[in-house]
Amino acid sequence: MAAMSGSSKNDALYISLLGLAENFRVSNPPNIRLCIHCLQSIFNINPPPLIVSRTHLQLGNILLAHTKNKELATRHLEQALPPSEEVDSVRFESASELATVYEKDFRFEEAKPVLQKAIEVSQQSAYWHCRLIFQLAQIYAIQRDHTSACHYLQVGADFAGSAHSEYTRLLFILSKGMLLLIAKKTTEVHETLSAAGQLIETYNGTPLQKDSLKVFFFVLQVCHYLMAGQQIYAIQRDHTSACHYLQVGADFAGSAHSEYTRLLFILSKGMLLLIAKKTTEVHETLSAAGQLIETYNGTPLQKDSLKVFFFVLQVCHYLMAGQVKTVKPVLKNLQQIIQTITQLHTDEEPVPANELDLFQWLPIEHMCILVYLVTVMHSMQAGHMDKAQKYTDKALMQIEKLKMLDSHPLLSAFQLMLLEHIIMCRLIMGNKTLAIQEIFQACSVCQQQPRLFTTHGAQIHTLLGLYAMSMNCMEAAELQFITAIKSSQGTELEMFVNLNLAIVYLRTNRFPEFMTIMDKVDPEKCQSCPQSLQASAFYVRGLQTFFQARYNEAKRYLRETLKMANSEDLNRLTSCSLVLLGHIFLSLGNNAEALNMVTPAMQLAGKISDVHVQLWASSLLKDLYGLCGDTANEQEGYRMHNTFTQSLLKDLLQSSQLPEHGLIHWTEGPCPFHLNTTPPANNVM
């Protein structure tokens, strides 16, 4: 009787202390110190083991939620695990909470045995058994041990099936499908999702459960189609199969009433067709997408982001065709849309009703950089070097800020493409010192993301060839161009490189070598090339016939160049053609016509800051004015020519003394990073 009285007294004390602790916890404001004090007092009444475990669990949870004393909280959770094999929800909750703490501290090898032991004894508690299995699978997934994670998810699915819980079984199956997707096991993903789809269709649970399973399933399906398209393209360059998967995804999104995601698939297909240079199909796809976007009734942010995607593809389509003038209104629309997005849209945008509409093409910050990039591409082709430099600097600064938060591979790709364009600007403007340092910087970006050198190695060797040309290192330029051609995979880049290689051969009087590649730069045989490359091919033929003193033929080629260049505002080609025509007329003794050509060439070259054309034009002008007896203008021509010569010679000497200059001799193997001893340029980073 006395014993019972003591037990009843302890029970009453326990309930009172527990009630006080809860009262202090929920009071306003909470008094966590007194709450913890009440719970700790429970140990003084010698409670049974189960209550000891429960109290340690409560203390651990409160310390984790309301204090920074993680070490003490962990000790309480460790003590909460019952010493005996008692099966109780306290044991399972303690194991789950302790494993969560270990996981957050990256103590995975300590978390796994805690969960495994709890799983072994939890089969009579279906909820905890399944929850613990999910948790253990998650830890294996974090460690990228997808095989073990999938094994436990299958164990969970089998258990849920035996426990007659079809909903939980499907959650396990879909989770397994998600991991297989991450592991890129395409065949197994397809099998798992096909089976899950059939089971979901026949599922007879509550409407909310069925709909939530469908959302999970649809999200995995969309990711599967997207990844299938991207993976096949990236690994095999099988554009046909990639486009097939993207069309399947578009059809699926349409059947799921997600017009937004359907448009993402269609635009992604357009992007691949653009890469595959299927011009007719690109035009058809973008035309259809444009009409659908105009009638799209989703959120303003979704519509604007789709417009950005659409306009970027349109700009790239025109630029790839060399249509620099035609693209201007589209580029203006793109710039206006991105301003609208950055100024008006916030994180408080309404959440779409259809879960499939939650996909995001690009974060807004990445969209801004992409718009900067295509603006730089346009400025470079149009000869607006100052504008190209301005937007490159803005974009690179934005990339550096974002990289501090999240070093996404896409940022490195953007950075590399911006560097490629600004390097060409530097070379045109006569700044070889910065150009070679930035080429080295481009190599460093590729070192951080090795895959980039696979896709951009040819471009880097092309830039080294252009740099070597500007330094009059013609042998090195030839080797760099040949290296670039080997890895250019038959693209327009190969045509561009061959055109520059042809100029190297012409400048070094190596006509036999020129004849070996003449067919590759024949303007009559590159009708499918972008207009800028066709115009360049006519220019190279004009240069060839000029060197051979076939002046009438040279004039015919150069007039073709001028006609094409003027129609699309290809200002650098225009200035080069005018000055070469001026040189031809000077050689023919037609000084007045020569002056009519060289004067506008000089003005245009000054407008685009092309120092090399200005040097050439000023040399011709001083000679022409001398022949005309115009002493004042002749002296001005001498002064300008001397200024450009001294500036270029100073830069050439400075650049040749840089250790990075040695890159012009690198044609195979990894980049020789040991050459670099100079810090990156301040106005680039």
Image (cartoon, grey):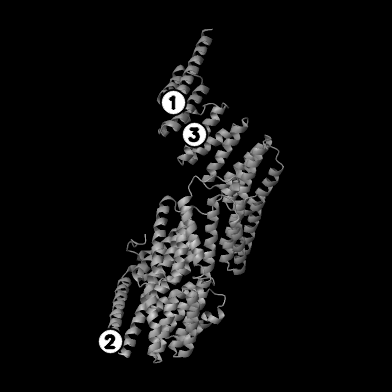
Q: In this orientation, which residue lies closer to the viewer: 378 or 196?
A: 378
- Image point 35% across, 73% down: which residue? 430
State how far apart marks 3 and 1 are (Cα): 29 Å
Amino acid, disc 2: Thr
Q: Quadrant of the N terminus?
A: top right
Residues tagged 3 and 2 counted as in contact (Cβ below 8 A):
no
Q: Residue furthest bottom?
A: 589
Q: Position of residue 514 (x, y in %)?
A: 47, 84
Q: Position of residue 470 (x, y in %)?
A: 38, 76
Label 3: state its secondary structure. helix
Q: Which residue is mark 1?
A: 28
In the figure, is residue 314 to the left or right of 644?
right
Amino acid, disc 3: Leu
Of circles 3 and 2, the one toward us is 2
Of circles 1 and 2, the one toward us is 2
Q: Which residue is mark 2?
A: 631
State how far apart marks 1 and 2 are (Cα): 94 Å
In this orientation, does residue 449 appear? no
Of pointers 3 and 1, the one earlier in the residue sequence = 1
State how far apart marks 3 and 2 are (Cα): 92 Å
Of circles 3 and 1, the one toward us is 1
Q: Quadrant of the C terminus?
A: bottom left
Of pointers 3 and 2, the one earlier in the residue sequence = 3
Q: Which residue is mark 3?
A: 98
Amino acid, disc 1: Asn
Of pointers 1 and 2, the one earlier in the residue sequence = 1
Count of numbered badges drawn on the protein: 3
How many residues crowd around disc 1 within 10 Å: few (fewer than 14), some, or many (20 or more)?
few
Residues tagged 1 and 2 counted as in contact (Cβ below 8 A):
no
Label 2: state its secondary structure. helix
Q: In this orientation, which residue lies closer to the viewer: 357 or 156?
A: 357
| 399 to 158, vertically: above or below | below
